[in-house]
Amino acid sequence: MSKLSEVGDRDGWRCWLCDEPVDPQMSVNDARGPSIDSRATKTKNNKNNSGPLQERLAHRACNTRKGAVAAVVAWPERLFVVDPAPIIPSLDRLQRKGGREVVARCPTRADAQEAADWLVDRISRLSPEMSVTADVESGGGQFLLILRA
């Protein structure tokens, strides 16, 4: 079995960046074709992304677009969130330190719960080894979305 097949099977043939399906039969030269992205993780003593490499499945175009800059996993436009935190840096901090992190504000409890459900589901595919929960807390006339590791 090729390394691409192993990574694809492990990741359920979904792009870790855009969370869309990746067709394993598509040419690796096609923009929507499969590729392996090697993401270095930050460690507590080294902040330069030189920790262990984590290989993830990505569309070739998503992988190329990311280039040498930090990957960004976007919040969907359908969610009503205010000041959403960047997802990957939030996960990196939770993985290193544990605890909790406020990741967004929402105008209603229903908006916050919808965002919480989406985020926990997305993280389950983005970082399957992490166990996180999302809580909704009211405060100051708004609802805070809080991740806990």
Image (tube, rainbow, N blue to C red):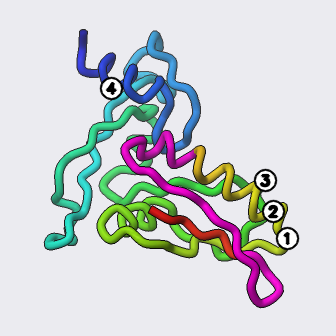
Which label lies toward us, 2 or 4? 2
- For image coordinates 24% across by 14% down, the residue present is 2
The mark that comes first in sequence, 2 or 4, is 4
Q: CA distance from mark 1 to mark 2?
A: 5 Å
Per the image, the residue denoted by label 3 is: 78
Q: Nearer the viewer, residue 17 or 41?
A: 41
> Which of 20 and 144 lies nearest the eye of the viewer?
144
Which residues lie in the magenta part?
122-143
Query: Is 93 on the left-hand or right-hand side of 59?
Result: left
Which image quarter holds the N terminus? top left
132 left or right of 50 in image:
right
Marks 1 and 2 close (CB-CB < 8 Å):
yes
- Within 10 Å of disc 2 (Cα), the crowding (few <14, some 14-19, many 20+) is some
Q: Amino acid at mark 3?
A: Arg
Residue positioned 75% across, 79% down in the render: 138
Give the spatial CA distance, label 3 vs label 2: 10 Å
